[in-house]
Amino acid sequence: MTVVKPNLFDYDRQGLRDLFASIGEKPYRADQVMKWMYHRHVTDFGQMTDVGKALRDKLSAAVDITPPKTIFEKQSADGTHKWLLGMDGSNAIETVFIPETSRGTLCVSSQVGCGLNCQFCSTATQGFNRNLSTAEIIGQVWVAARHLGNVPHHQRKLTNVVMMGMGEPLLNFEHVVRAMSVMRDDLGFGLANKRVTLSTAGLVPMIDRLSEESDVSLAVSLHAPNDELRTELVPLNKKYPIAELMGACQRYVAKRPRASITFEYTMMKGVNDKPEHARQLVKLMRKVPSKVNLIPFNPFTGTRFERSEEEVIRQFQKILLDAHVLTTVRRTRGDDIDAACGQLKGQVLDRTRRQAEFRRKLEGQVDAA
Ligand code: SAH
């Protein structure tokens, strides 16, 4: 029988210290190992030269440091880099790095597939398989950081993480929060709180829980300014309608005086891009300190939606800007390698069997919160 050893990527700083304590080692030893892992990308205990030989041997015997396996990686003409990372069996998820002049953003997945069934998202067509572990989430950042460390252009540095890849991060709460803590830890990736963003389709009770347990930027996938249309596009809206969602957003910023919420709004031709939608959106945005990020719809095989015309997006943006709502249009990046928003698919197996289980879990987690 093979014994699975603990993978150190599954622990945050406190967890590692506790693990080390359980094998009779001091906390600072855990800190040293953490620095080797995250600052120098070393996974072999033998190379950790400031850790004594006896402890290195003890660690090698008891634990592992195993990052996700890269199945393939691909670079877009615009510099966007996508990894397909192997999880268990034949499941795989995608991670995307988007370099810009003044920052580099990594888009990280939280689940294998997604069960929320947003009508315009290609991840939804894959169904849901399972939550990612902490190691599988932080491992995505590790793989990208190691790659970027090897590239000698400073503008390619990883400065921001957005939990906007495959999956609904608030349905994998514990692992996502733990991984985000390593992202922000000085012994981990040392990112500022505001440079780590969690994006949600709007799980109201879990937004409240996040507000208590973590301090990161929050983005909300709104996509429609009224309940009728939003329920059609984002079925979760039936359970948590817009008024309740805005309430959770207000509570989130109330605890963080200078914070604002980013509302994502995918622009779909003839669906949610009319001037009246923009005017309704202005009214909603008055309720909470906010920014709007308009995302031109990215097409994928089999979708019934189309991208709004550029001029229509500009007009929509103008209505918001004229009403003093800070509004940006997300530049489409990496679409030549299917790495743009809503195009991530990975490889999701077993999805039908897991669908029913997921629905039960969704009910359970949401009700328990
Ligand atoms: N489940 C979370 C995290 C995924 S974020 C959430 O919903 O926020 C992925 C972002 O891309 C979301 O804002 C999503 O609504 C948007 N998106 C999905 N499909 C898209 C598409 N085809 N074109 C453009 N944006 C899309």
Image: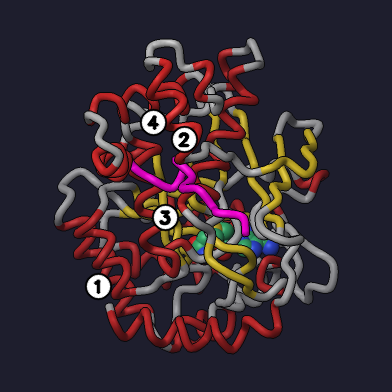
Q: Quadrant of the N terminus?
A: bottom right
| SS type, badge 1 | helix
User: Residues at badges 2 and 1 in contact (C-beta under 8 Å)?
Assistant: no
For marks 2 and 4 on the same chain, the one whose residue lies earlier in the sequence: 2
Compared across the picture, whether 34 is left or right of 158 comes to: left
Q: Quadrant of the C terminus?
A: bottom left
For marks 4 and 1 on the same chain, the one whose residue lies earlier in the sequence: 4
Kindly identify the amino acid type of the residue bearing the numbered disc 1: Gly
Residue 159 is marked as none
| SS type, badge 4 | loop
In the rendered image, which residue does mark 1 sit on? 247
Residue 160 is marked as 2
Q: Main secondary structure of the magenta part?
A: loop
In the rendered image, which residue does mark 3 sit on? 176
Q: Is residue 196 magenta?
A: no
Using the numbered discs, state the Cα–Cα distance from disc 2 to disc 4 in whole angstroms: 14 Å
Q: Residue at x 55, y 25 (%)?
A: 44
Residue 156 position (above or below residue 109): above
For marks 2 and 1 on the same chain, the one whose residue lies earlier in the sequence: 2
- Judge: label 2 CB < 8 Å from ligand 1: no
Kindly identify the amino acid type of the residue bearing the numbered disc 3: Val
